[in-house]
Amino acid sequence: GQQVMQIPQYQHVQEGEDFTTYCNSSTTLSNIQWYKQRPGGHPVFLIQLVKSGEVKKQKRLTFQFGEAKKNSSLHITATQTTDVGTYFCAGMDSNYQLIWGAGTKLIIKP
Amino acid sequence: EPEVTQTPSHQVTQMGQEVILRCVPISNHLYFYWYRQILGQKVEFLVSFYNNEISEKSEIFDDQFSVERPDGSNFTLKIRSTKLEDSAMYFCASSRTKTSTDTQYFGPGTRLTVL
């Protein structure tokens, strides 16, 4: 079946360093959505990308959707302790189902 | 801001028992979803529901599972005979439409523990 692969599984960074997580789908997606989940919490919607090659920014977060609408990335510049959590991508397939990546856990080293 | 609510926040049950998880979607939304997340793993789609019937379901959503919209506000997930492996967080979500530009809003989840 359709899969969305997300890497890395974990990323340890010093506060102030950058963080990037990547998602890759086996098939073309209708859109890709990004969510953040704090420990013990529920996924919170961050952003949705629909157009091929789209780039969106939210303060220190930059989201990209690939030209083929199969891959996406989230980049956080100068991480802060409030950025801690697991970041999930979720691709919408042709049946409007969200296919989730495994998530990348961002850990800030003290 | 309107939000999806779920009850209970935590449910503990014995293996073989029936459980019903409840959700109140956002009031003007028409599409409803259930997802589950086993601890430490990714979110998995279970089922989508529209116009009082199931739209799509995943392989996980077998005969032990059923969904219902018993009234104008609640959306429920029933597990008939729980198994240990059903222990997970169950998230309800809703969306206004079902297009590539719409967003699914997630509830806070119900943590189901099967003993």
Image: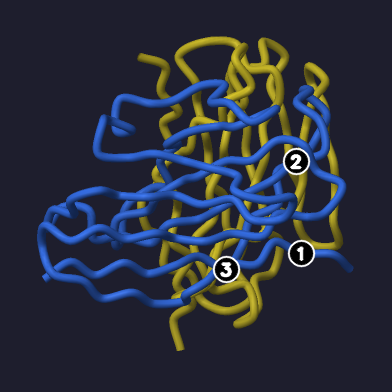
Question: Crowding near pointer 3: few (<14 within 10 Å), some, many (20+)?
Answer: many
Q: Amino acid at mark 3?
A: Pro
Q: Chain of mark 1?
A: B
Question: Crowding near pointer 2: few (<14 within 10 Å), some, many (20+)?
Answer: many
| Color encoding of the figure | by chain
What number is the disc on residue B3? 1
Label 2 to label 3, Cα distance in Å?
Answer: 15 Å
| x and y, in percent, of residue A19 in the image | 57, 58
Comes first in the chain, label 3 or label 1: 1
Please name the residue shown 83% across and 20% down the image: A51
What number is the disc on residue B95? 2
Q: Which chain did the renderer colour yellow? A: A
The C terminus of chain B - image quarter:
bottom left
State the residue lying farthest toward the front.
B71
Q: Chain of mark 3?
A: B
The N terminus of chain B - image quarter:
bottom right
